[in-house]
Amino acid sequence: MKRTLPLFPLNLVAFPYQNLNLHVFEPRYKELIADCISQNSTFAIPSYVKNMVEYGTEMEIREISKEYEDGSYDIKTRGKRIVKVLDMENPYQNKKYAIGAIEEIPNKNNADLILKEEIFEAVQEMYDLVEVDNRKLSMDFQVFDIAHQIGLSTEAEYELIQLTEERQRQRFILDHLKVILPKLRDIQRSKEVIQMNGHFRKYNPPQEF
């Protein structure tokens, strides 16, 4: 499905179903948000990651938390779906902001239960190692729900939103977790050794002596 959306490029990756709070202060984006509010319409946040505007997320405005005298806004938004910018006009006609022709990227929700369990256990271990409260993690998660919480780089998050199947996304973040967990375990072991420094410790001599 092809249509047009106002574009609000940012140096971040927004995910579907993610809540994102924004302080909007630039004149062109104040106009963009004002238009979206008046028209009850959505806009897109293309991720400006590789010096280009291509993939991003369609966002809906959930709440206007504050409107300032200078026209700035504090707004609460939520991601809806991944989109690809096919073409754009910047600025668009008599507007200060850009509008682009976008294509909705299909999403196949084909999660693998075994992969999901592996991810769940790996994320729980990661949270334990970095001492993060993991009580909010439950087995009904989708990859996009946890993608900002597992230490992915912005470039890796950008790769993630281009994958069109949940199973692909599961494998992607599981590969990431398999790389990062051994490093975190090593850090934890080093931390324990440092904490033991100066304390009385029991050493077992080699059996040969």
Image (cartoon, helix red, strand yellow):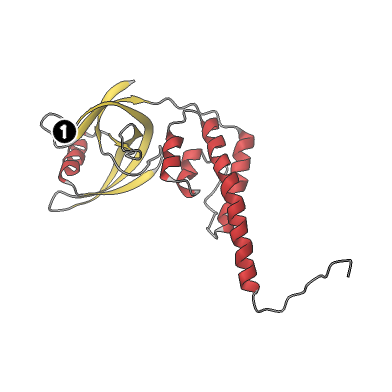
Q: Nearer the viewer, residue 53 or 84?
A: 53
Q: Of the residues shown, which amino acid type is indicated by label 1?
A: Pro
Residue at 18% from the left image edge and 44% from the top image edge: 30
Residue at 45% from the left image edge and 41% from the top image edge: 156
Q: Is residue 116 left or right of residue 159?
A: right
Q: Quadrant of the C terminus?
A: bottom right
**Residue 148 x %, y %:** 45, 46
Picture quadrant where residue 135 is located: bottom right
Q: In the displayed orientation, state which residue is furthest to the top.
A: 1
Give the labeled residue for mark 1.
91
**Residue 38 x %, y %:** 18, 37
Q: Is residue 181 left or right of residue 88?
A: right
Is any atom of residue 125 visible in this view?
no
Residue at 28% from the left image edge and 39% from the top image edge: 9
User: Please, is residue 9 above or below residue 104 in the view?
Assistant: below
Residue at 62% from the left image edge and 51% from the top image edge: 182
Q: Nearer the viewer, residue 58 or 162?
A: 162
**Residue 151 x %, y %:** 48, 49
**Residue 3 x %, y %:** 28, 23
